[in-house]
Image (cartoon, rainbow, N blue to C red):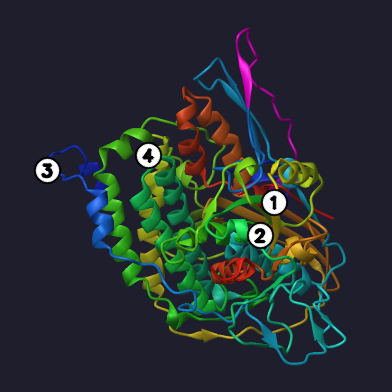
Amino acid sequence: MKYYEFGDKTGRYVGRTEKYDVYASTLAGIGKDEDDHEERTPGEIYFNYGPSAGGLRESVNFSILTPGEAIRDVIINSGFKRRNIRITGDSISDVMLKVERINGFHSASHSIAYALAVEDALNVDNSDLNDARIVEIELERIRSNIDVIKGLCESAGFAVPEKQLLLLREEVARIISTAFGHRYYFSVNGINSVDGDFSRITLNSVEKQFRSLYDGLLSSKIFLDRIQENGIVSDPLSTGPAARAANFRYDARLDSGSLNYGKYSTVMESSGDTFSRFLVRAEEILESINIIESYDIKKIYRKNRMELNGSGEGTARIESPAGDLFYYVKINEGRIMDIQMSSPSYLNMRNFRYALKNGNIFTDFFFVWESFGIWISELEVRFQ
Amino acid sequence: MGKLRHLDIGTGGEVSVNWFINGVKKRIKTEKLDKYNLMYPSILEGVSDYNCPTEAINNGKWNMDKCIFCRQCDLNPTGKQDTYSIDQKIPGIFKKSLYLYPVDSGTCGACNVEFTTLFSPQYDSSRFKIFMANTPRHADALVVMGVHTEGMEQILREAYDAMPEPKIVIGLGACALSGGIIGRSAMEKYDIRIAGCPPTPASILNAIIEARGKK
């Protein structure tokens, strides 16, 4: 393991796998959770929402503690759609097919993080693919951030920008499909290999359209009023755009050795509210376009189907669109014996709750929820 | 990093966008369903003796319900966006309006995103009189996505029971139909089976339009 070791906590907290608490460079035993849910007082009710309801893209249940309008606390049950995925004893390439489907919308991030962990375990030199993998992840980030901002517009009943962002999301999906043969990067990434025609990635139109929409949203006072000073959270145990929106310079592009971004500047905000998360997501779309254009890759990569038979342990941590994504793998003669994955949705879900109970009312719910970009699919996976 | 542009907000002079005019100026973006084609997923042709991990190839025969379109076998993609089969036609009563209620049994999220893409300007499902319901009480068709999960089994059954008659069930994607590479199918029987991992928006709309029949 080049970048991680087992031991005490060191550096910032990144997330949790089934067995470990993950820090910047160590894997520690799971610490004790403090249950600090608010007590129900006379006159208050638990209002149930989900697990299957209009407005929820994935299955998740919220029990909202309320005296009527204010949200005092929320109990989140995300376990309804928990998937048990069998990986023990499977080949490295068969497990890749499953890893891609942990979070289909962030499949490039998951498949690349898994590939990097396997390459770390087997001491495979992957430096040739560094730039191509960064381009893939940044393109995925553009689509994901567009989707989050679309969700905010939908919550505000802002139908025109919502539909225009939906149109833009689909245009990015088509760029991904044209370059990589699949709208969700399935079967694109392998161990020390990528399959794609990077010369097909052109983002001029996307940038122009997004800048116009972004400027429009920034001048829409009704929209800004809805997202300013709601869902405020500023907690050092945070990740991704939500952390950067609260002035924590947490970014695996800066402090992880798994991918080398070279000189890179992080987008930061300080208020920690939904508006700040919106700004960070929007600015990161433009930053990701800059990163992709700076690499200017025109190469066609073809996948090699190499079978690997080595043994070892490896780790990788990358910045997925929602924050730190960590993988640990244990391999025995080409067979996966253990996977530990920590997704950004773990910390984002925790902070969503803190943000929601921080002086919000029912109508704020969707703004806060959408602003974190949480995926239950990556949160509720158990490997067997 | 330079100065963020939002810092100029409130300094005066900014003009608020009229979103209605903005929308009209963008003109119509809706497309014909065959305008945008892709190879994966699409109907596959040919013969392969590949040892398929989802058993989508059995004795040389291709079973699209089980296929995750992983591009490992020798079958050739045709680009045809009709990766579906119809066991039961949609009742005539729904010819002028069909409300869909999606249930996520255990997805990776890709099917969910493709389902929402039906309502994008490019696909605009409302022109085909296809809409989304916010509750199973108002739904004509249940759209099931993802593999079987213990936690969603009862929710799925309750959603189906809550729907008024007549009703149909649509299986969306390899996980719902066969379990794909992840698990087992979410339901035993579907009226419309739309294959793909995930199915394309065009394929989903083609399936519903064909199952509903001509006007």
Mark 4 highlights which residue?
A: A275
Mark 3 highlights which residue?
A: B13
Disc 2: which chain? B
What's the residue type where badge 1 is placed? Pro
Residue plotted at (20% across, 43% down)? B8
Instruction: Report how far apart the C-alphas of labels 4 and 2 lie in the structure.
Output: 46 Å
Q: Position of residue A161 (x, y in %)?
A: 34, 52
Give yes or no for residue B94 being in the magenta stretch.
no
Which quadrant is the N terminus of chain A positioned in? bottom right
What's the residue type where badge 4 is placed? Phe
Instruction: Report how far apart the C-alphas of labels 1 and 2 lie in the structure.
Output: 7 Å
Mark 1 highlights which residue?
A: B166
Q: Which residues are magenta?
A: A22-47
Disc 3: which chain? B
> In the figure, is residue A314 to the left or right of A224?
right
Instruction: Report how far apart the C-alphas of labels 1 and 4 lie in the structure.
Output: 45 Å
Residue plotted at (59% across, 67% down)? B204
**Closer mark to the observer between disc 4 and disc 2:** 2
Label 2 CA crowd tier, 10 Å (few <14, some 14–19, many 20+): some
Dot 2 or dot 3, earlier in sequence: 3
**Closer mark to the observer between disc 2 and disc 3:** 2
Mark 3, secondary structure of its residue: loop
Q: Is residue A103 visible?
A: yes
| Residue nearest the observer in this picture, A43 or A243 | A43
- Main SS, magenta residues: loop
What's the residue type where badge 2 is placed? Pro
Q: Position of residue A337 (x, y in %)?
A: 85, 62
